[in-house]
Image (tube, rainbow, N blue to C red):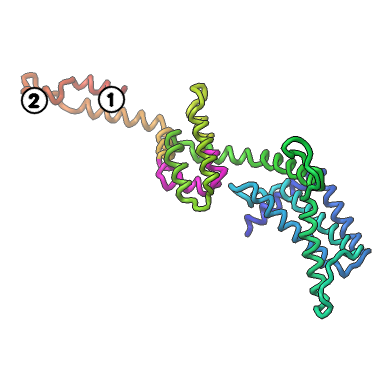
Amino acid sequence: MLEILKNVLETLKKLFTNHITNVVVIVHIAVVYGIYNYDPTLYPDFFIVWFAGIILSAVELGSRYKDEPSSVLTSSPGVMYLVINGLICCFGFFLIQNFSWHFEVDEILPLMAQRTMDIMQAALGSMMIMRSSFIKLGNDSQTDLGLNIVLKKLLAMVDREVDRVRATKRSKDVTALLKGTSYSDTRNKVITYCLDVMQNISPDERRKLKFELNAIDAQDECVDRTTRKYSAGLLIYNIVGQSVLESAVRDLGLYSSVECKESELSVDPQEEFESVRDTFEDMLDTPSPPPNGNSKSVEEGSEPTETQADKAIE
């Protein structure tokens, strides 16, 4: 709970350092003031419509980032996209109330039924209208002419900003998790195991991943295997996320090799020198074999003691 609250506070801090965020906050204040002058009794209805718009847009935005949807929804660009969609739904609810565009329910039903219908109409109707196009222009109908062009541009801006924010985290996660693995381990063990433990990866995603991995394999020799390893790791990271990739590396025993390598690199030079010195002194203390020793002793210790000590120092 404290971790979630900390993330929310950090997100709010980042939001209020953005000029666009300040504009959105001012618009929200103006909307609240306008509702107060229009009909204060509709405050709960407007809030429900606003919240419904946020939920629907959160489903849309979260589905675009399969590796970690929650982090996208708590990022600054993601929050901006959610609240803007909430304001759009509130505007639709205002039009319904002001121009009586609502669907009439049966008169025998209570007033709450009509209010519920207006809320559903405003939330779902606004989302559908803002994502509709009336005419498609250009070759292969690539250009839409309609209200959806506004949200498309906004969503493209959010995608680019979210991608910039998450690129740093993805790079740090992948390089840290795959630091001690080789390209063959990442390609044949980690990725295969991640695909096996996941149950909802579609065949299209598997085929696309295989095609992209083959493209990495086909790269020329100017691209080293370390870069290929991290590129392959990013492909599976984007599908399964950090937690699954970390668990796979640990369960396959690849973490132990990383820790072993780090421990070997962290040996104190002074301790290593003292260990070699003790070995050298022990060898000097051992008695040398007799001159007329049998052939067996000569074969077992054919090199003189000084030569063995020299080798130990080396």
In the visual, does 179 lie left or right of 109? left
Q: Nearer the viewer, residue 81 or 134?
A: 134
In the visual, does 89 lie left or right of 231? right
Residue wearing tag 1: 312
Report x, y in % for residue 54.
74, 56
Report x, y in % for residue 86.
78, 56
Q: Nearer the viewer, mark 1 or mark 2?
A: 2
Crowd around label 1: few <14 · some 14–19 · many ≥20 (10 Å):
few
Crowd around label 2: few <14 · some 14–19 · many ≥20 (10 Å):
few
Secondary structure, mark 2, is helix
Chain-order first, disc 1 or disc 2: 2
Q: Residue 119, relative to residue 126: is it above or below?
A: below
- Please count the marks in the image: 2
Q: Residue at x 66, y 48 (%)?
A: 72
Report x, y in % for residue 3.
62, 55
Q: Main secondary structure of the magenta part?
A: helix
Q: Residue at x 50, y 41 (%)?
A: 177
Q: Nearer the viewer, residue 234 or 59?
A: 59
Secondary structure, mark 1, is helix
The reply to whether the C-beta atoms of the residues labelled 1 and 2 are less than 8 Å apart is no
In the visual, does 70 lie left or right of 199? right
Q: Residue 101, relative to residue 69: is it above or below?
A: below
Report x, y in % for residue 68.
60, 49
Residue wearing tag 2: 296
Q: Quadrant of residue 265?
A: top left
Q: Residue at x 27, y 29 (%)?
A: 279
Question: In the rendered view of the protein, which quadrant contains the C terminus?
Answer: top left
Q: Nearer the viewer, residue 66 or 245?
A: 66
Span shown in magenta: 233-256
What amino acid does circle 1 point to?
Answer: Ala
Q: Residue at x 85, y 66 (%)?
A: 102
